[in-house]
Image (cartoon, helix red, strand yellow):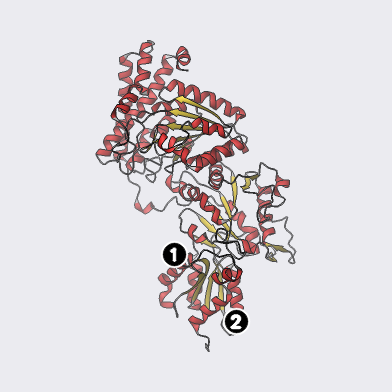
């Protein structure tokens, strides 16, 4: 972090923050390398790795063929062989072509070998909707991956996490999947001065409140924050919780917040059925049922493959208006206490 | 190839190869019985008939080389030097097993031997081997990643992706295809338009050779030649080991898909009987030698069974260990 200016006025995009994180990792450890489709000559399909090929050369910035299974598996093998690979999968939908490697190898080798092996591979995936890319480039499957024991699922939503989560992931001896929401790449923000590292263990309260907890992650965090602003004008103070890590879930932070606010709305860009939102809801019900003043509510993506047309896509996704409506359903628009 | 190899074969080396194969055969025969006794459960895939491939290849591969294998891997594990005790204990599901009872027959591991499993997803090990080879190359080491897989794997996309990537990046991978002609019950010519596997490899600009996988000398010589080239930066190679499994695919297979006559014909070409008669006819071995090797192998298996029987179970309180790496104990 020393090479990063401590100037509190430093503004940076999410994309540049990820790139700086990659650059740090590559500079700091000769065992780190990046591979994936179009990470080199093209500069990354979302321009994240632009310039890295020139700086680090083709041995460490490796363009791969369109062979997700082979290059993700090669990342796993390279990790077993002592390297610290960062594998970029262009879009989470494409990761399904590598699901065998992620599920059957990365997630299982440690346990299946009785703890002899560990797989310190970092897989970066673009996820989410909002850019009218249609049903095969817009899904949010991180909740699926969070189902799998052996994986760590991290979702950087803030500029700080975009800048610092990669280092934490590389320091982990376990396979870590980092989900970068494609809508966030252009987002600009300030780095917290002096912040040198983040953990892969804890959820974070991004806005304190007393009346309802909005549990979110990724792009949904910003929808929750927008909703919280609107609610605040009505006198409803929402606490906004950023999960950050979907596996293992930081139950303690979730439950502590809900115990305080006594109400929860889960905002999840995944589909509702069998979702991460369902898991978070269940844990709240299991552990804080008697402290709830209202049923837990969920705002998820409509149960359709994400459509292309903007008005349809918008209608499918969680929105601040839907979050506000969900909160109203719990508290009532005419709340007076 | 065999004739040339025979010319220089010594008694010592011949007996060593025979011993390696007899150890595997003895182990597998015992496993067959133990399965009937319900000591071993789950899926069990025996290696009878294919011993020459493991025995010949492991003669050449060095401790620094990385091995990736399939679910029919008892032979590879034992020939690699994982103790029979640890392998048998694993089949029993015991704590002393080479995967602490979490793997079973299809998932044998030994990090100290660079033995990376034991992969039960057909072709699932190939990308991992490519990555292990990439790690060798990027760290400027000279080890080879040797990847065993059956001919059924060539139907999977991962086979093609992996061969291409290994060749494109000129990685030190030795692809060892054990072609035993049947993917479970599906004959190669019922599954592949092109049944010559070396042709497929050559399409990826990779050197590929078909080898008599029943002839341990031929296997050893082919692996030696391939590994030497790979180690010297020649890029990956594929060897198609033409072999045959004498037993069923697994313990649940009534073998409706092949004739007894076919099995008998291959048994006559079996790697152990052919090596035995060859060594005898060359005057390098006596019947007493053979009997002694077989006795020793059986005794080793007996000891392994005893070890497995008397080993403790992993406590269920440790069930959730190793899902994530544990900090150094």
* Residue A185 x/y as whole percent: 66, 61
How crowded is the residue under tag 1: few (<14 C-alpha within 10 Å), some, or many (20+)?
few
Q: Look at the numbered disc 1 and give the secondary structure of its residue.
A: loop
Q: Decide: few, some or many residues near mark 2? Use Cα within 10 Å; few <14, some 14-19, many ≥20.
A: few
Residue in the foreground of this view, choosing between B65 and A97: A97
Parent chain of label 1: A
Number of disc labels: 2
Residue topped by disc 1: A274
Quick one: A128 or A240, which is closer to the camera? A128
For residue A232, which numbered disc appears in the image? 2
Q: Earlier in the sequence, mark 2 or mark 1?
A: 2
Residue at disc 2, secondary structure? helix
Using the numbered discs, state the Cα–Cα distance from disc 2 to disc 1 in whole angstroms.
Answer: 31 Å
Instruction: Examine the rendering and report whether any part of residue A72 can be seen.
Output: yes
Q: Quadrant of residue B84?
A: top left
Task: Determine contact: label 2, label 1, CB under 8 Å.
Answer: no
> Measuring 62% from the left and 48% from the top, which residue is drawn there?
A37
Q: Position of residue A46 (x, y in %)?
A: 66, 56
Asked if residue B128 can be seen in this view, the reply is no
Left or right of B164 in this view: A259 = left
Chain of the residue that carries numbered disc 2 in the rendered image: A
Across and down, in percent, residue B295 comes to: 30, 23
Q: Nearer the viewer, mark 2 or mark 1?
A: 1
């Amino acid at each position: 972090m020393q090479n990063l200016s401590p100037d509190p006025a430093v503004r940076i995009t999410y994309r540049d923050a990820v790139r700086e994180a990659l650059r740090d990792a590559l500079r700091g450890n000769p065992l780190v390398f990046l591979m994936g489709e179009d990470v080199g000559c093209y500069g990354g399909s979302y321009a994240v790795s632009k310039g890295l090929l020139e700086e680090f050369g083709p041995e460490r910035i490796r363009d791969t063929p369109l062979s997700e299974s082979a290059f993700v598996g090669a990342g796993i093998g390279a990790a077993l062989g002592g390297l610290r690979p960062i594998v970029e999968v262009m879009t989470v939908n494409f990761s399904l072509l590598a699901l065998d490697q992620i599920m059957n190898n990365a997630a299982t080798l440690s346990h299946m070998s009785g703890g002899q092996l560990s797989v310190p591979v970092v897989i970066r995936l673009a996820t989410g909707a909002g850019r009218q890319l249609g049903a095969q480039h817009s899904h949010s499957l991180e909740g699926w991956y969070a189902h799998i024991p052996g994986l760590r699922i991290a979702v950087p939503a803030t500029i700080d996490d975009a800048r610092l989560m990669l280092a934490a992931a590389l320091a982990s001896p376990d396979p870590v999947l980092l989900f970068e929401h494609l809508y966030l790449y252009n987002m600009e923000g300030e780095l917290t001065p002096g912040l040198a590292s983040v953990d892969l263990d804890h959820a974070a309260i991004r806005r304190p409140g007393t009346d309802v907890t909005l549990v979110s992650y990724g792009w949904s965090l910003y929808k929750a924050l927008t909703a919280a602003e609107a609610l605040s004008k009505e006198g409803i103070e929402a606490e906004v919780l950023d999960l950050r890590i979907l596996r293992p879930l930081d139950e303690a932070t979730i439950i502590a917040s809900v115990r305080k606010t006594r109400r929860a709305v889960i905002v999840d860009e995944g589909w509702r059925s069998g979702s991460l939102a369902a898991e978070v809801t269940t844990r709240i019900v299991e552990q804080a049922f008697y402290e709830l003043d209202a049923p837990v509510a969920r705002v998820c993506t409509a149960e359709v493959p994400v459509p292309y047309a903007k008005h349809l896509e918008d209608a499918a996704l969680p929105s601040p208006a839907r979050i506000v409506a969900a909160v109203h359903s719990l508290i009532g628009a005419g709340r007076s206490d | 190839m065999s004739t040339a190899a025979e010319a220089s074969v010594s008694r010592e080396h011949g007996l060593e190869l025979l011993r390696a194969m007899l150890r595997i055969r003895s182990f597998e025969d015992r496993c067959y019985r133990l399965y009937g006794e319900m000591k071993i459960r789950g899926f069990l895939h025996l290696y009878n008939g294919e011993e020459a491939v493991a025995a010949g290849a492991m003669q050449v591969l060095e401790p620094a080389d990385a091995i990736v294998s399939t679910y029919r891997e008892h032979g590879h594990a034992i020939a690699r030097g994982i103790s029979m005790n640890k392998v048998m204990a694993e089949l029993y599901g015991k704590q002393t097993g080479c995967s602490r009872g979490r793997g079973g027959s299809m998932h044998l591991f030994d990090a100290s031997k660079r033995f990376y499993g034991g992969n039960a997803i057909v072709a699932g090990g190939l990308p991992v081997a490519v990555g292990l080879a990439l790690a060798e190359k990027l760290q400027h080491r000279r080890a080879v990643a040797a990847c065993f897989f059956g001919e059924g794997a060539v139907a999977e996309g991962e086979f093609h992706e992996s061969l291409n990537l290994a060749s494109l990046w000129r990685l030190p991978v030795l692809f060892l295809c054990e072609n035993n002609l049947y993917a479970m019950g599906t004959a190669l010519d019922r599954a592949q338009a092109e049944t010559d596997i070396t042709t497929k490899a050559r399409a990826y600009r990779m050197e590929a050779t078909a080898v008599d996988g029943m002839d341990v000398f031929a296997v050893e010589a082919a692996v030696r030649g391939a590994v030497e080239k790979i180690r010297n930066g020649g890029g990956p190679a594929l060897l198609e080991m033409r072999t045959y499994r004498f037993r069923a695919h697994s313990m649940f297979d009534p073998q409706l898909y092949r004739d007894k006559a076919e099995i008998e014909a291959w048994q006559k070409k079996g790697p152990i009987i052919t090596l035995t008669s060859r060594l005898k006819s060359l005057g390098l071995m006596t019947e007493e030698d053979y009997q002694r090797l077989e006795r020793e192998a059986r005794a080793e298996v007996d000891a392994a069974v005893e070890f497995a029987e008397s080993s403790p179970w992993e406590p269920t309180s440790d069930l959730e260990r190793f899902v994530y790496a544990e900090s150094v104990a």
